[in-house]
Image: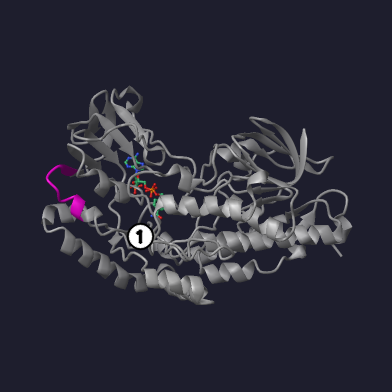
Amino acid sequence: MTDTDVAVIGAGFGGLGAAIRMRQKGLTDFVVFDKAEEIGGTWRDNTYPGCACDVPSHLYSYSFALNPKWTDTFSGQREIWDYLLRCVDRYKVRPHLRLGHLIEEMSWEEAAQRWVITTSQGVYRARVVILATGPLSEPATPDIPGLESFTGTVFHSARWRHDHDLSGRQVAVIGTGASAIQFVPQIQPVVGKLRLFQRTPPWVMPRRSRRVSKAEHAIYRYVPGAQRLMRSLLYWAREGQGIGFFHPRINRMGQRIAELHLRSQVKDPVLRAKLTPSYVMGCKRVLLSNDYLPSLTKDNVDVITSGIVRVTPNGVVTADGVEHPADTIILGTGFRVTDMPVMHHVRGREGQTLAQAWTPTMRAYLGTTVAGFPNLFFLLGPNTGLGHTSVVLMMESQLRQVLKALEYMRRTGVTAIEPTPQAQQRDSAEVDRKMAGTVWATGGCNSWYLDSTGRNSTLWPGFATTFRLRLRRFRPHDYQSVGAHRELINQ
Ligand code: NAP
């Protein structure tokens, strides 16, 4: 058994951010586990053609590690991954990494006041765990009858098969979310036939990305504060866009732009009708693309809206009885966000798993801690997602809270903390109350933001600034100590 003070689980944006911030605070007794052999999380795994971020580069990076070299206003996957790799070296995180360590089981040992973490490469013991496994890490495979009988090649967009040449192939793409709209225009010119199985059309807005000029690079590099100023401008512009999500009437103006975008890019009225959503824009994630809709107008593309009934060895059968031939099926079907596998492997104070504690719905205190799970901190936990700006901002707010909690424990000598059920209940009720008026609740769609109970347990129903302000202070009275030093907390 190896002892460590803090164990971080996940070496993606969140876990690496935690490692960097700890090092900056002078904390060195920590390790970062990842099941993969390299860091990067979602930006390592999603290598599909055209993969890029739809949040501006200056905002989709750590505030404490600005990058003056972004080549595009919206970065591509490889560039973001490279950025993370550079951060690992620059902040000396590599010695802390424990790659190739799959977390098999993790349980709180009350007597020792420690987490016991069983990994594929041995058992570790930690006082504190920061769970940064990310909501978009486990691909969701749809439960379509017969999928296993398909004799061609099937893969998920997050596990792209670069060894499978798509030239001239009969390709069925299932899903029309943020991932599909990026890879469909890339593969369309290459494949023989592309059949796009669309269950719900997305709203697509113009993508205003451009290359960053040499002059801009020089300004960011040599003019003090220039990049911070740009980041602030983007931050407030994006916060402004948030208003539409919280007051859906305002969003209708944005929806008009998306309608014009569709009208200008798709002339065929039959195809356009298929591609026109029936819900208010913003209810599902708003997608940005200039080439997705035009790619659907090409001769080798069919947009199929009749529901999928089953998969046969040679194709996909839809509700209208037609069998659509395919030799390749690409699943652009998203991720297991409200049913993350890790939930089944984490056991709290009374032996209950996170999955049990989160049945029927995920609830947390400030999206960061959960009653019954001492010294466990989540990055991008329940209700911390955003529709309008960068989740890196949320993650950094949480990191501030975690560091404050660690400092509080050090100062008071408390061995373990967890939120009181009352504080968690109060916080969660407030989230639900605010959510009620948002486009996610009233927009008339069924999105992956909602869990099986229909509750939105993934998004934060407010501005990033509000979240930041709420997490600025550590409130001891919302926490209880577990174990030896309860009286300190109640003082
Ligand atoms: P997604 O948004 O969850 O989209 C999944 C798609 O698959 C939807 O169109 C869904 O249809 C469809 N689908 C799922 N199960 C199906 C089934 N059984 N039969 C037919 N269709 C089915 O997944 P994603 O596109 O991978 O994106 C997930 C999230 O990742 C995004 O929302 C975003 O937060 C992030 N992301 C961001 C970027 C970016 O920054 N540019 C890029 C990629 C991903 P319904 O709509 O009807 O459910």
Q: Quadrant of residue 399?
A: bottom right
Q: Residue 299 in magenta?
A: yes
Side of 425 relative to 278 (left or right)? right
Side of 165 relative to 358 (left or right)? left
Q: Secondary structure at mark 1?
A: loop
Side of 289 relative to 357 (left or right)? left
Position above or below: 23 against 165: below
Residue 406 in sight: yes
Query: Which residue carries the number 1 mark?
Result: 286
Residue ID at (17%, 36%): 192
Q: Residue 386 in magenta?
A: no
Residue ID at (21%, 61%): 262
Image coords of residue 485 (percent x, y): 87, 54
In this orientation, which residue lies closer to the viewer: 47 or 147?
A: 47
Q: Amino acid at mark 1?
A: Val
Q: Quadrant of the N terminus?
A: top right
In this orientation, which residue lies closer to the viewer: 410 or 267?
A: 410
Position above or below: 340 against 371: above
Position above or below: 242 against 332: below
Q: Quadrant of residue 259?
A: bottom left
Q: Quadrant of the C terminus?
A: bottom right
Residue ID at (48%, 40%): 138
Residue 242 in sight: no
Which region of the structure is painted magenta?
294-302
Residue ID at (51%, 69%): 463
Image coords of residue 35 (percent x, y): 57, 37
Report crowding for label 1: few under 14, some 14 to 19, many 20 or more residues within 10 A (C-alpha).
some
